Image (cartoon, rainbow, N blue to C red):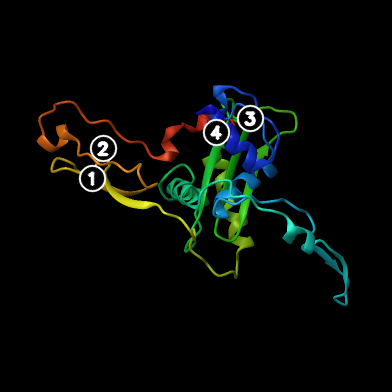
Amino acid sequence: TVEDLLHLSERSRGQRELPREASVALGSFDVSPLEMARAYATFASNGREVHPYVISHITDAHGRILLDNRPELERRERRQILSPGGAEIITSLLMDVVRQGTGRAAGLPGRSVAGKTGTTNRNNNAWFVGYTPELVTALYIGYDNPRSLGAGATGGGLAAPVWGRYMYKALLGEPANPFRFPGSDVVRVEICEQTGMLPGPGCGNTMVELFLPGTQPTEVNAELEGGSSNEPPPVIKRTDDVFAEDDLGF
C-alpha cells in the first residue's frame, strides 16, 4: 500500500514526513543525494538502518587523536528496517538494472553492482544511485535553479557513466566481494519468463527469481502448457522496465 511505502521510505531515509499521495511511488517529491544514499545503504546493509556522519575521527601529523566520534557512532542503535530477505530481493532486482537495463553504463568489471537510474519528464535532472558490497554512492546532475539539461540527458546516458567512472577509481585496489545477506530466507524458483508462473511444456524461456517464503508461484500456466491459446502471453517486465526513465521523478 502507499502507507507501507511511505513508512519504509521515512524509516530508511530519516524521519522527514512525506506527502500522503499515491504519486509518491513515481517520485513526485524532492529528495537530496544524502537521503538517497542513506536509503540505498539500507539495502546494502542487510536491511539495517544507516546513520550518516561527516567525521569519524581526526589525527595530527604524528597520529595523535584530536577528535574521535567513533565510540558514539558505535553506540547508535541500528534498527532492522527491512528483512534480510527483502534486502536481498531488492538488490537482485537492482543488479539486473546494471546487468541488462538502463544502468549498464554503471557496470564495474569483476564487481557486484546494484543501482537505479532516474530521469525527470523535462530532463531537469539525472540520477544514478547504486552500491557495491563496499560503497554506496548517490549521483545527482542538475542546476540549482531547475532547467533542462538538454535533450537526451537521462539517468542512464548521463549519470550512470559518471557514477561508474567514479566508483572504479574509488574502489581501485580494494578486493571485490559478493553481496551477502545473513539471515535471508529467500527461495530461488525457476519461472517462465512469459508468465511469471512455473514453466510448463509450452514455455519458451525460463529464469530464476527470488521470492520470500510463501510468495513464490505454485501453478503452471494452463494456456501455455496446453498450447491452445492464440493470444500472446503477458510479459513480466523486469524492474528496469516497470517505470520508463521519463516517469521517474526522484
**Residue bearing the label numbered 1:** 205
Residue 124: which numbered mark, if any?
3
In the picture, the quarter occupied by the C terminus is: top right
Give how far across and how far down residue 163 sits, in percent: 59, 50
Disc 2 to disc 3: CB gap under 8 Å: no
Measure how far apart labels 4 and 3 are at the Cα level: 25 Å
Tell me the crowding category of disc 4: few under 14, some 14 to 19, or many 20 or more residues within 10 angstroms, Cα based: few
* Residue 15 sits in quarter: top right
Q: Residue at x 56, y 29 (%)?
A: 3
Measure how far apart labels 2 and 3 are at the Cα level: 35 Å
**Sooner in the amino-acid sequence: mark 4 or mark 2:** 4
Judge whether 75 appears above or below 215 on screen.
below
**Sooner in the amino-acid sequence: mark 2 or mark 3:** 3
Disc 4 versus disc 2: nearer the observer: 4
Residue 194: which numbered mark, if any?
2
Measure how far apart labels 1 and 4 are at the Cα level: 32 Å
> Which element is circle 2 on?
loop
Measure how far apart labels 4 and 2 are at the Cα level: 28 Å
Judge whether 157 appears above or below 64 on screen.
above
Tell me the crowding category of disc 3: few under 14, some 14 to 19, or many 20 or more residues within 10 angstroms, Cα based: many
Judge whether 171 appears above or below 19 on screen.
below
Q: Amino acid at mark 2?
A: Gln
> Which element is circle 4 on?
helix
